[in-house]
Image: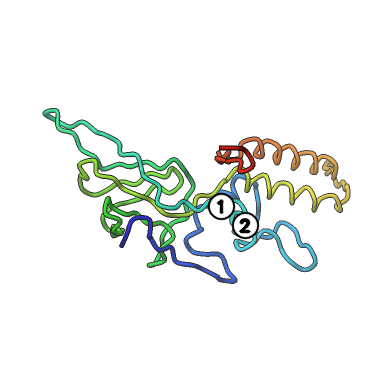
């Protein structure tokens, strides 16, 4: 396999991917999104598929990123390299043979999953044996959790615009307060969204 040619398995399903379980759970926690919070035109929110749909709007495909090796000192001054870090976080996992996270060696060959473990939220790959610092590369999907959370909170605010105030014994619920809280959370998470640098060149200038 040549460099940069790691193959990611395409997935098209009508249900949430098993590989998305951890990031879906994390986003639910960030947005307090229950699986049956409310309904719109007969559709109940938030199912795993709906949460995944939001996440898929805020994903970056990482293609053959060179991971950063972490030097660790042992007894007698020995140095080992087993931990490698990505610049990204919150990756979709590989599950039941479904390749959504691929690690390759310095020759471009795919490394078997038995040779390493992954902390997907932190983007950390830990190998079972010393690599001696050789290059390792990652291909996968990294999710912008802050942007996804802002998206969910904004959708919640849009839904509650049609809600109404109510009160019961010693309890009251204000629609305006709910909307305000949702928008404040959307703003809070929106300010923490990922920032990407893009290099542009003008073609209308003289060389």
> Is residue 158 toward the left or the right of residue 131 in the image?
right
Residue farthest to the front, as pictured: 206
Name the quadrant of the C terminus.
top right
Count of numbered labels shown in the rendering: 2
Marks 2 and 1 in Cβ contact (< 8 Å):
no
> Is residue 74 toward the left or the right of residue 24 in the image?
left
- Residue sitting at x 54%, y 49%: 143
Quadrant of residue 187 within the rendered picture: top right
> Is residue 150 toward the left or the right of residue 173 in the image?
left
- Residue sitting at x 14%, y 32%: 78
Residue ID for mark 1: 59
- The image's mark for residue 91 is none
Q: Whole-percent x and y of residue 151?
A: 68, 48
- Distance of label 2 from label 1 (alpha carbons): 13 Å
Colouring method of the image: rainbow
> Is residue 178 toward the left or the right of residue 29 in the image?
right
| In-front residue for pair 175/127 | 127
Q: Secondary structure at mark 2?
A: helix
Residue ID for mark 2: 51
Q: Is residue 204 above or below residue 63?
A: above
- Residue sitting at x 59%, y 57%: 56
Quadrant of residue 82 within the rendered picture: top left
Q: Whole-percent x and y of residue 11?
A: 51, 68
Q: Give the crowd class for mark 1: few <14, some 14-19, many >=20 residues within 10 Å.
A: some
Q: Is residue 121 above or below residue 19?
A: above
| In-front residue for pair 136/169 | 136
Quadrant of residue 87 within the rendered picture: top left
Q: Secondary structure at mark 1?
A: strand
Earlier residue among tags 2 and 1 = 2
Name the quadrant of the N terminus.
bottom left
């Amino acid at each position: 396999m040549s460099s940069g040619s790691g193959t990611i398995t395409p997935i098209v399903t009508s249900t949430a991917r098993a590989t998305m379980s951890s990031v879906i759970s994390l986003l639910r926690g960030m947005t307090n999104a229950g699986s049956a919070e409310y309904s719109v035109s007969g559709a109940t929110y938030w199912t795993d598929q709906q949460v995944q749909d939001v996440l898929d709007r805020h994903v970056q495909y990482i293609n053959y990123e060179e991971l950063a090796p972490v030097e660790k000192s042992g007894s007698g001054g020995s140095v080992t390299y087993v931990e490698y870090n990505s610049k990204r976080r919150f990756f979709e996992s590989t599950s039941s043979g479904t390749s959504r996270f691929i690690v390759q060696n310095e020759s471009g060959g795919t490394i078997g999953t038995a040779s390493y473990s992954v902390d997907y939220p932190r983007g950390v790959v830990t190998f079972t044996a010393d690599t001696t610092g050789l290059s390792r590369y990652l291909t996968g999907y990294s999710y912008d959790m802050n942007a996804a959370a802002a998206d969910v909170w904004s959708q919640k605010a849009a839904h509650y615009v049609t809600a109404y105030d109510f009160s019961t014994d010693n309890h009251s619920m204000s629609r305006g307060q709910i909307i305000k809280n949702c928008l404040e959370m959307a703003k809070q998470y929106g300010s923490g969204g990922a920032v990407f640098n893009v290099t542009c060149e003008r073609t209308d200038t003289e060389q």
